Amino acid sequence: MTKLAIVAISDTGCVREHNEDNFGFDAEMGLAVLADGMGGYKAGEVASAIAITSLVHTVKQIKGSEEKVDLDGRQHEESAILYRALHQANQQVYDSAHDNNAHRGMGTTFSAAWFHGGKVSIAHIGDSRIYRYRDYRLELLTTDHTVVQELVDHGFYTQEEARASEQRNIVTRALGIDPMVEIDLYDYDVRMGDIYMLCSDGLTDMVEDIDIAIIIRRSSTDLEYGTSELVNKALANGGKDNVTVIMIRVEGGQSGNKTWTHRLNKFFSG
Ligand SMILES: [Mn+2]
């Protein structure tokens, strides 16, 4: 296990009535998850809540069982479990949207980071992002699944034009919209001192990457301060959307030999 410090804040923002973002983390298990729901009246927060609960449940179930995980061509068990758990979560949100008129059309972004043995496995759908701060540099580890990102990829838009676009929040992929979903999965090496950040678009629409980097650099030894500074900056810049930030600092390498059962018992108990 990689030893981690994790801090998270979610704020409704200055304009929205509901907070449709949801998140969860467990430092001992090394898992952090964030979802930004979308849909009609209150359906967005239902979608993101179902997705988080379902994913955590499936991960616990698989990790807690004696079952041998089929890697399905992937390098790490954690990555294979995230893939399976996200498809399960997709099905749950989809079913709920179809069983209940008020939830019709709901969906959610999903970003997950799972730290294990010097690696982090990332799973990602939509426009909630995961960044890594290392050697004074902020690097985006995920690609937004949005209309404007596709236009940037094809050379029709610059990043600046994308930021200014009215359509920047239209996602091309989300959990729960279709019976099948395409999930981005990546594995990265983890170094001591790395800082990882999961965030909803309520941060990145309001605060530019350069300002995010400055805040993280100023607060790299004080995660709580850094996390609240990021959220405060989004609010000060207008807070037009719900803002959620999870900051994770890698504090050490392999830790003790605690059993999964012990770690799982602590999952979300706080
Ligand atoms: Mn949002």
Image (cartoon, grey):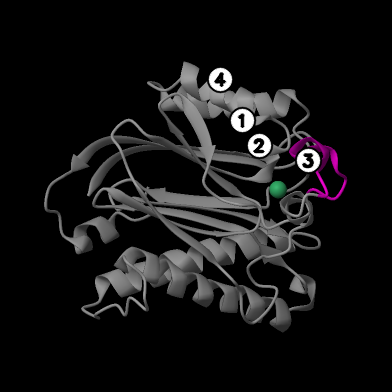
Q: Which residues are magenta?
A: 156-168
Task: Please tell me in which quadrant of the rendered image residue 213 appears.
Answer: top right
User: Which of the marked residues, 4 or 3, is nearer the chain's N terminus?
Assistant: 3
Is 8 magenta? The answer is no
Q: Are marks 2 and 3 in contact (CB under 8 Å)?
A: no
Report the mark closest to the observer, 2 or 3. 3
Task: Please tell me in which quadrant of the rendered image residue 95 appears.
Answer: bottom right
Report the mark closest to the observer, 1 or 4. 4
Q: What residue type is disc 4 on?
A: Ile
Q: Which mark is residue 214?
A: 4
Give the CA separation, mark 2 to mark 4.
14 Å
Q: Are marks 4 and 3 in contact (CB under 8 Å)?
A: no
Q: Which mark is residue 231?
A: 1
Give the CA separation, mark 2 to mark 1.
7 Å
Residue 44, image x and y in percent?
71, 60
* Residue of label 2: 203
